[in-house]
């Protein structure tokens, strides 16, 4: 992002200059960084760890896979497994099983460096029920989409900090957005989550599948900061944006990404 920002500033300087001299801009490539994304849940595996590198200015959508890494997931009960590389940069488990209450550790060794992370899997928060309500077009602003807003009803366990992410699948397709909850103001209470963007608005005869992911704080912080970075990138004018920070990571040695252990509970509803 810093290179892109400097590039725009240089272009603006040239545009404002009356000089017609040809200027050769030497725009350096960004140094690639390792990106590790891995999860383990209480649902049946296999679980996947994806390892890649960041691209540079000239190839902003290119994320080279990192092959040949040594990837290990272990838990605090003495279980450990070396993952198999099933495709370039994709590493999968075959035996280890995620269980609530256990702490899981990830270790990646690649190109002579070691990266580690830990995550404790919380107890699952259950979905009590799903409902929906009709939203007329323009009811919450001129651009509001007509359709049905989903309501996810659940009870927050008292006495502990809880963090959640909601994933909504419309007719099998994951809706865009990071829908997050923390119980700072609702600890121990029943809650109705319905803060969804237009991409998660439903229509008649749609089938919605909801996943409630109960996260530890480090995974919640990663999703929260990632959502902020993506929102800033979507809404900020290019010439006025500040360079966003990378999302929070629980990985060591400067790696980007995250390793998260979380529970998953599902429910579904048909709009009719």
Image (spheres, helix red, strand yellow):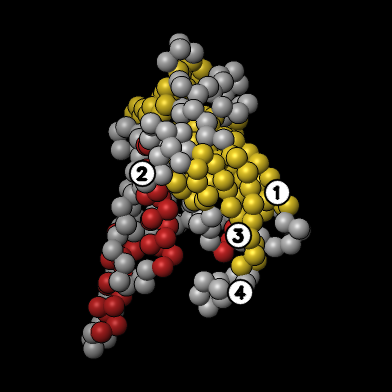
Numbered disc 2: secondary structure: loop
**Label 4's element?**
loop
Q: CA distance from mark 4 to mark 3?
A: 12 Å
| Position of residue 124 measured from the top left corner of the image (x, y, whole percent) | 52, 31
Residue that appears at 63% across and 26% down: 44
Query: Is 169 on the left-hand or right-hand side of 24?
Result: right
Residue 214 makes an appearance in the image:
yes
Q: Along the polypeptide, which appears first: circle 1 or circle 3?
A: 3
Query: Residue at 54% of width from left, 41% of height from top?
Result: 154
Q: Categorize mark 4 by other alpha carbons within 10 Å: few (<14), some (14-19), many (20+).
A: few
* Vertical position of residue 243 compared to residue 222: above or below: below
Q: Badge 2, how many Cα within 10 Å: few under 14, some, many 20+?
A: few
- Horizontally, residue 220 falls left or right of residue 138, namely left
Q: Which mark is residue 184?
A: 2
- The residue carrying mark 1 is 269
Read off the residue under disc 3. Answer: 149
- Earlier in the chain: of badge 1 and badge 4, it is 4
How far is disc 1 from disc 2 in space, using C-alphas? 29 Å
How many angstroms separate mark 1 from mark 4 (CA)?
A: 22 Å
Q: Are marks 1 and 4 in contact (CB under 8 Å)?
A: no
Name the residue rendered at 45%, 20% in the picture: 102
Q: Is residue 39 visible?
A: no
Residue 259 — which label? Answer: none
Write down the quadrant of residue 231 in the picture.
Answer: bottom left
- Give the residue number, with chain letter if any, for mark 4: 137
Marked residue nearer the N-terminal end (3 or 2): 3
Between disc 2 and disc 4, whose residue precedes? 4
């Amino acid at each position: 992002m810093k290179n892109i920002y400097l590039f725009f500033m240089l272009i603006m300087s040239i545009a404002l200059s009356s000089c017609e001299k040809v200027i050769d801009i030497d725009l350096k490539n960004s140094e690639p960084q390792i990106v590790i994304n891995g999860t383990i849940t209480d649902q049946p595996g296999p679980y996947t760890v994806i390892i890649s590198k960041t691209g540079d200015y000239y190839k902003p959508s290119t994320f080279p896979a990192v092959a040949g890494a040594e990837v290990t997931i272990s838990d605090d009960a003495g279980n450990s497994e070396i993952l198999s590389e099933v495709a370039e940069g994709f590493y999968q488990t075959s035996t280890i099983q995620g269980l609530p209450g256990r702490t899981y550790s990830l270790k990646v060794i690649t190109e002579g460096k070691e990266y580690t992370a830990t995550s404790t899997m919380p107890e699952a928060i259950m979905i009590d029920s799903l409902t929906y309500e009709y939203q007329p077009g323009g009811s919450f602003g001129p651009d509001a989409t007509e359709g049905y807003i989903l309501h996810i009803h659940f009870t927050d366990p008292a006495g502990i900090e809880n963090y959640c992410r909601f994933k909504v699948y419309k007719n099998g397709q994951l809706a865009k957005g990071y829908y997050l909850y923390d119980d700072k103001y609702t600890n121990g209470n029943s809650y109705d989550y319905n803060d969804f963007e237009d991409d998660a608005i439903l229509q008649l005869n749609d089938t919605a599948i909801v996943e409630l992911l109960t996260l530890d704080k480090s995974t919640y912080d990663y999703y929260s900061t990632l959502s902020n970075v993506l929102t800033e990138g979507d809404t900020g004018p290019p010439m006025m944006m500040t360079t966003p920070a990378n999302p929070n990571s629980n990985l060591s040695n400067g790696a980007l990404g995250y390793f998260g252990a979380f529970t998953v509970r599902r429910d579904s509803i048909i709009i009719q």
